Amino acid sequence: MTSDTADALGPDDRPRPPRADERACLTGFLALNRATVVRKARGLSDADGARRVLPSATSISGALRHLADVERSWTVELMEAGDYDRRFGGDDDPDGEWDVGPTDSLAEILADYEAACAESDAVIARHDLDDIAVAGPPEEMPSLRWIVVHLIEETARHAGHVDVIRELVDGTTGE
């Protein structure tokens, strides 16, 4: 990684997963993946955050909105049967969070993502890993452990997308 690239991403202040018990390890890897997505969005303009460089609607801002929705839907909604504001998308527009324009504020999208992660963390802290989600038939509901692993997988997958998009948008590479 060149110094120009390091400067574009800023200091690498991402948390490192502990080599500890299962819960700390899982939440540590989730925190690392979340911080990686945020790190990749740093320093972009609103227009570059919304820029589509692939044939799909995928953009960095869209991925962040999507991940905020994923956090809330799996923890707030499914784990605790709580309501959350699906401002972008819904049953009539399931992929609406990906519809981001060049005037949508990347700073606001990042703040909402970080708020969604905090809401998720609060739900995760209230439950044991073996607790079962309550928003549906028990035989179909996953455990919190499954949900946390799914959040790690989903966030890591989209971190990869964001990494490639960032390189295509402005040439910035790095972890």
Image: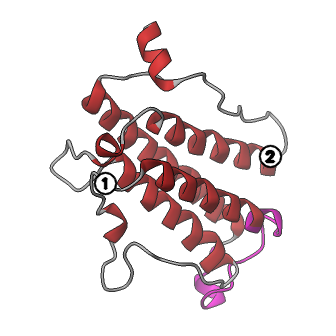
Q: Position of residue 58 (x, y in %)?
A: 28, 52
The mark lying in front, picked from 2 and 1, is 1
- Of the pair 51 and 149, the residue shown nearer to us: 51
- Of the pair 97 and 18, the residue shown nearer to us: 97
**Residue 137 painted magenta:** yes
Tell me the kind of residue under disc 2: Ala
Q: Earlier in the sequence, mark 2 or mark 1?
A: 2
Q: Position of residue 163 (x, y in %)?
A: 39, 34
Residue under the point 64% across and 70% down: 75
Which residue is tagged 2?
24
Q: Position of residue 169 (x, y in %)?
A: 27, 32
- Of the pair 140 and 16, the residue shown nearer to us: 16
- What is the span of residues highlighted in magenta in the rendered image? 123-142
Residue 76: which quarter of the image?
bottom right
Residue under the point 36% across and 39% down: 45
Which residue is tagged 1?
103
Q: Position of residue 66 (x, y in %)?
A: 43, 61
Tell me the kind of residue under disc 1: Thr
- Crowding around mark 1 (Cα neighbors within 10 Å: few <14, some 14 to 19, many 20+) is few
